[in-house]
Image (cartoon, grey):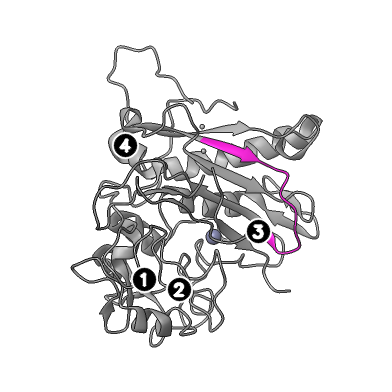
Amino acid sequence: MCHKKAVVSKLRKRLFMLIAAGFLMNTPEPAQAEVIFDFNFTDALGVGFNANGQTGSDRRQGLTNAGNYLAGFFKNYTATINMDVNGSETGPNTLASAGSNFSASVATNGFVSSGDVRTKILGGDAADPSPALADGTVNWNFANFQWEPFDDFQPGELDLFSTAVHELLHAVGFASSIGQDGSSGFSDPIGAPTAWTTFDQFVADSTGALIDGTFALDTARWNAASVGGAGPVDGLLFNGPNAVLANGGNPVPLYSPATWLGGSSGSHLDTDFFNGTNGNALKMMNHEGAVASGLDTRVISAIEVGILRDIGYTNISAVPEPGSLAFVLASGVAVFVRRRRKA
Ligand SMILES: [Zn+2]
């Protein structure tokens, strides 16, 4: 699955993709800020997340738990994020994919392209650019892989919670919109000023940001760094101030293997750098799972929190706050994939 971009040139709309409901407690106390991921399970009965009996129930609960964990970082925001969920994905390599819809028109160049999920978290439900539609999509592959929704891992089972948190992080904006060829997904010529996501503001090489003050990408440096390989010297980096602070003052390596990997390159932390050695702990936003099967990374790291701050969530909590007051009710175009770890 690749990084699909449909473009409506006149309106400068971009279609990207990714999705949840709650209700306020009927108490005299002020409503607590809350982000709720409301998942709309679209599978046919007996399929995917709507598998029969306890299997389907557990899968839905596992995804809900992941949404609640991520929402715990967003206690200073209030929004209900509606995600369409399809558990009928198939294929040998893709575990799951997710993304935000981008349904708002973008009128100017700049770091102004915001997915509907991000727009609603930052601006509240009233800011929804397309209230009649879901805010994003989650796709899941139950056909080729076995999943453990909770903690009772059997041999060969993958960690549903870890992968779900990973995918939802893409939906909230952990995603570059820079195409392999340097295009923005809008109709502007490659290398010309155009519109980008906030994430792209901080996509850099070792000499600095790759998009200048006119919002034009330095294509020569992009062409080198986007396939620059592992580590902080030749590959892509994320140089947002909060992420750098969390990384000991250093820009954060982004996944940029020598061969571009659509849906993975540029929009993940560098799996080849954050590989569990040399003090570089495995990360939730590595492009593939940390383990071939079994319990995977389940914690959003300080670096990842820093990136969320840099892309606009300035009031995000450093750690998730427990004690949600609201219920999550079980009730696009997916672009970012998580891949199976090489065995
Ligand atoms: Zn991913």
Q: Which residue is depicted at the point 40% across and 17% down?
A: 25
Which percent across, then down, holds residue 288? 60, 66
Q: To which residue does mark 3 refer?
A: 295
User: Which residue, given by chain and number where applicable, does mark 2 sit on?
Assistant: 181
Q: What whole-number distance in Å separates the C-alpha atoms at marks 1 and 2?
A: 8 Å
Q: Is residue 67 above or below residue 159?
A: above
**What amino acid type is highlighted by mark number 4?**
Tyr
| The one of 287 and 1 positioned closer to us in this rendering | 1
Residue at mark 3 to residue at mark 4: CA–CA distance: 30 Å
Residue, far bottom: 233
> Where ligand 1 lies, by quadrant?
bottom right
Q: Circle 3 — which element?
A: loop
Quarter in which the N terminus is drawn: bottom right
Secondary-structure class at tag 4 = loop
Disc 3 + disc 2, Cβ < 8 Å: no
Q: Is residue 196 above or below residue 77?
A: below
Q: Total marks drawn?
A: 4
Residue stretch rendered in magenta on the structure: 83-94
Mark linked to residue 190: 1
